[in-house]
Amino acid sequence: MNTQPINPTGKSYSQACAIINFKRLVFISGQIPETKEGVVPKAFEEQCRLAWKNVETQLKDGGMGFENLVKLTVFLSDRIYREENSRIRKELLGQVSPALTIIIAGIYDEKWLLEIEAIAAE
């Protein structure tokens, strides 16, 4: 499979992402900043890293990694988290450049400061 970023921004996302000759798609439900034990960190950075870790776990369990991401939707509880969210995403994804949407939303559990859903392909 090949992914082709279309109009990459240089900020760990592209305006679009084409998938060429893929075998399968994996749709990842919104991953929340909560451990299996139900612990939710208080600070945004910890929550963001935990949500990304949960995305990575789903990818690994599906036989994939960050390099397979083609679409991300990040739900933030408040605009004040935009810069920190962007910094952490860039750090974790490096040169991976999936299509991206960020939505400021009321999130299901008010303890959660973000939620991340994804689509991956191989």
Image (cartoon, rainbow, N blue to C red):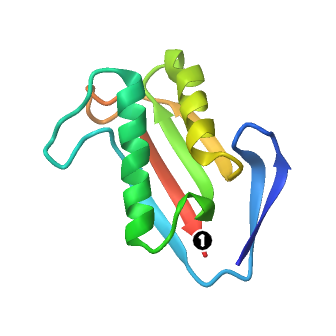
> At which x and y percent is residue 114?
41, 33
Residue placed most toward the observer, 96 or 9? 96
Above or below residue 56? Residue 22 is: below
Q: Tell how many labels.
A: 1
Q: Which residue is mark 1?
A: 121
| Quarter of the image where one finds residue 19 | bottom right
Above or below residue 7? Residue 70 is: below
> At which x and y percent is residue 48?
42, 34
Callout 1 crowding tier (Cα within 10 Å): few <14, some 14–19, many ≥20 = many
| Quarter of the image where one finds residue 29 | bottom left
Residue placed most toward the observer, 82 or 77? 82
Residue placed most toward the observer, 27 or 57? 57
> In the rendered view of the protein, which quadrant contains the N terminus?
bottom right
Q: Residue at x 46, y 74 (%)?
A: 63
Q: Residue at x 39, y 62 (%)?
A: 58
Q: Residue furthest top?
A: 80
122 relative to 108 in the view: left or right: right
> At which x and y percent is residue 106?
39, 28
Q: Residue at x 66, y 45 (%)?
A: 94
Q: Is residue 104 visible?
A: yes
> At which x and y percent is residue 98?
67, 53
Residue placed most toward the observer, 17 or 97? 97
> In the rendered view of the protein, which quadrant contains the C terminus?
bottom right
| Quarter of the image where one finds residue 51 | top left
Mark 1 falls on what kind of element? strand
Q: Is residue 114 visible?
A: no
Q: Residue at x 18, y 49 (%)?
A: 36
Above or below residue 22? Residue 26 is: above
68 relative to 105 in the view: left or right: right
Residue type, numbered disc 1: Ala
45 relative to 110 in the view: left or right: right
